[in-house]
Image: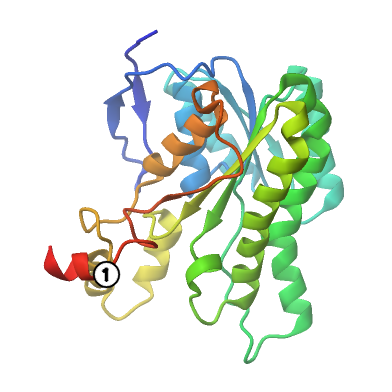
Amino acid sequence: MLRCEFQPTCSLGGQRILRKLSMDLGLRNKIVLVTGGAKGIGLGVAQVLAAEGAIPVIVGRNAADNATAVQDIVAQGGQAWSVDAELNETADCRRAVEQTVTQWGRIDGLVNNAGVNDGVNLEDGDTDRFLASLRKNLIHYYEMAHFALPELKKSRGAIVNVGSKVAETGQGGTSAYAAANGGRNALTREWAVELAKYGIRVNAVIVAECWTPMYATWLATLPDPEGTRAQIEARIPFEHRMTTCEEIANMVAFLLSAKSSHTTGQLIHVDGGYVHLDRSITALS
């Protein structure tokens, strides 16, 4: 069934860019947990899901950010809900799932997205910081999936893990984040095998250079933000620009939907060809 409706995208400064949707992904009234769903890529995912008629449940530590994200989605004509939770805490991960089930009666999908590249490196890092980084970038992926699994079995829901190119390319100075993302990739494949018997599909969307408020904040700390951004974008083969939150979110929504009914165990790069295409095409284009 085709339909037309307007969808907000993730953008800076509160601006809204609206576009028409042309395909119904069949997500109407689906309850989808989205960790870190109040900002950046997670917010983009929540907005796209709401535009598709789903009900994103935003899970994050900042109550004000969560409330603002929900209010914004509702103002745009969608539905959303939130749970204030510190994902570093096992009890909070469990509570986020339990409160969602109490409120909505089911869980139809899980998007593991929350995390931060915290720069815990090998040269002058330490074991405590390394383990803490794994806790905030990997362990809650496992815990949220573990606690949501009984409901996902009932709904034959899907899991999408958001990951980073750093696991495959390296970056330098970020051992813990690279390890966490390698773990996300491995868990995606492992869960796809383990959960296939329940009809649960598990995939990952791998992000490279995506324009988010956090990225803008980092660039602003550099001597030449615009020049640095231009250098980065020049190395992105397709259209020489960063990926948008909306483009990541569109793939996440597709993987959650029955439109991707025979896709599981995949690491899908939405990155303008950044990771895999020959850099010579950048020089020639």
Q: Position of residue 237 (x, y in %)?
A: 25, 60
Q: Is residue 119 above or below residue 7?
A: below
- For mark 1, what is the residue? 279
> Where in the figure is residue 187, as x and y percent of width and height?
70, 52
Foreground residue among 82 and 142: 142
- Where is residue 239? Give x, y as percent: 20, 53
Task: Specify the quadrant that holds the N terminus.
Answer: top left
Amino acid under disc 1 = Arg
Q: Position of residue 174 (x, y in %)?
A: 57, 76
Instruction: Identify whether 80 is placed above or below 231.
Output: above
Quarter of the image that includes the C terminus = bottom left
Q: Classify 237 as above or below 90.
A: below
Q: Residue at x 55, y 45 (%)?
A: 266
Classify mark 1: helix, strand or loop: loop
Residue 10 shows up from this direction: no
Most extreme residue toward the top is 1
Kindly indicate the quadrant of the structure image that contains residue 34.
top right
- Residue drawn at the location 42% of the way across and 35% of the way down: 250
